[in-house]
Amino acid sequence: MRDGQGSRRAAAEKNRLRLNRKLRAVLIQLKEERFAKTLRLRRIGPLLVKCAIRANASAEGNMDVNVTDRFGRGFSIRNVVECTLVHTVRCHRLNLLVPKILVCLLSSAAFVSAQTPRPAPTPSIVYAAHDSAAIEHYRTNSAVVHAMVDRLVLAVTGQSDVAKAWRSLIAPSDKVGIKISAAGGQLFTTHRDVVSAIVDGLTAAGHPRSSIVVWDRTLNGVKEAGYRPGAETFQLLSIIPRDGYDPKAMITAPLMGKLIWGDHDYKGDRGKVPLLSDTENTSDRSYFCRIVSTEVTKIINVPVMSANEMNGLSGCLYNVTIPNIDNWRRFSEGSAFGASSIAELYSNPLIARKVVLNVMDGLVAEYAGGPEPATNYALHHATLYASKDPVALDAVALRKLEEWRAQFRVPPIGHAASYVESASQLGLGNFDRNRIEMRNVGR
């Protein structure tokens, strides 16, 4: 009897490996053909999972498949295939039929191709304010930077004065947060003068300074960058390890990540339980920080203009996603799925509905080596950018960084920032340069 059970287990394992190989082949083919370009394809995701289960009713009881809206906007086709792949590993009886999944994919593609194309998105405007006097030897001129920020917000909103401009973006009842980038240390953190100009504008619009939150995951190096922890008139906050993440604001993805201390679900050895293995300390879950989920209702996104050697660009999309979740390292390992997930993360209503303005700090631009400080790959750009469209602003920044990389013979990095174009395909903004208008805001 034991020999019979062993044979059945071996056969089941062989069948599982065969199915995994076929599903991986489908995933690779979908990626190569850029099958998920059309937004409508994402709506078919839950249907594909259900069809896969219906291929054999007995499989339904053996699979833990959640077809809910995991990222707030639905799955992409690639997500569904990867999700199916992950969950088949958990099956005790692998009865899903790959041919039927393929039939679902092909019939879904035919259905989508027969639909009327979506109308072209409204063109986006990216505003730029440049002043060579704004920075010299890495030291900013406060008055010049303040004037640049004011010109940008007036241009973006079309208002006649700064107070009206900020009131048009943020209501008096809103709790305002300014998301900075503090990963660059002394020279490459979001400049304090930029933040101070935004805080001054919000104060003029009626928001008490003490109610304004300025934050990043950690604040290492901000003191050297000119901030005054504990002495600022606004709230300068970092995310509290573990308890700073909201268990009610959970997202899942078919990509496992190794948990470390500070992640919400991390289980450490405190002398009461045996040391957990790496497998036990992995998870497909991430949680948004409480600052994003409950403490602010509107966000001013202020990233720096920096390349990111893992994710291509530490721009608008990156700045309000990766630093605001735990178990984030799985999305920053250069994998194709990890990169595209940044776009999915941004589409979550906790982010997409709260960000009202993006201001990119390009006073110093780091075209390689980021997000860590790398002065050998930095230059004084003396420019600030602003737009309501995070995708368009990231697209502009990415192309400029690529120009500098080519000029200084550094390999291109655009392939690592594929999520910027993916965000455009999700309807989050414009990536095509023909749909982006640049406007320079003079003195």
Image (tube, grey):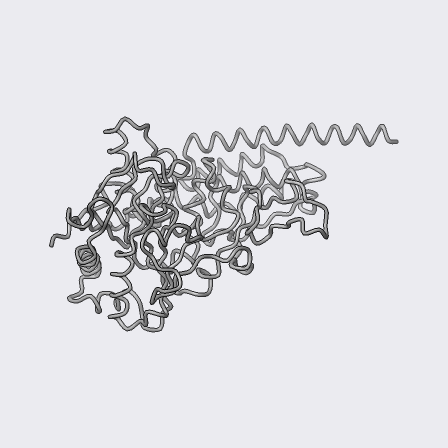
Horizontally, is 93 left or right of 206 in the view? right
| Residue 48 vertical placement versus 19 (above, below) | below
In the picture, the quarter occupied by the N terminus is top right
Q: Which is more toward the observer, 234 or 35? A: 234
Kindly identify the residue that appears in the image at 44 percent across and 48 percent down: 322
Question: Residue 390's spot in the image, x, y percent?
Answer: 31, 50
Q: Which is more toward the observer, 170 or 442? A: 442
Instruction: Count how many numbered circles sit on residues in the image.
Output: 0
| Residue 363 vertical placement versus 351 (above, below) | above
Q: Which is more toward the observer, 49 or 281? A: 281
Which image quarter: residue 198? bottom left
| Residue 329 vertical placement versus 238 (above, below) | above
Question: Residue 57's spot in the image, x, y percent?
Answer: 67, 44
Question: Residue 359's spot in the image, x, y percent?
Answer: 28, 53
Q: Which is more toward the observer, 301 or 91? A: 301
Residue found farthest to the left: 443
In the picture, the quarter occupied by the C terminus is bottom left
Question: Residue 353's spot in the image, x, y percent?
Answer: 38, 59
Kindly identify the residue that appears in the image at 22 percent across and 51 percent down: 140
Horizontally, is 380 left or right of 35 in the view? left
Kindly identify the residue that appears in the image at 68 percent across and 40 percent down: 91
Residue found farthest to the right: 1
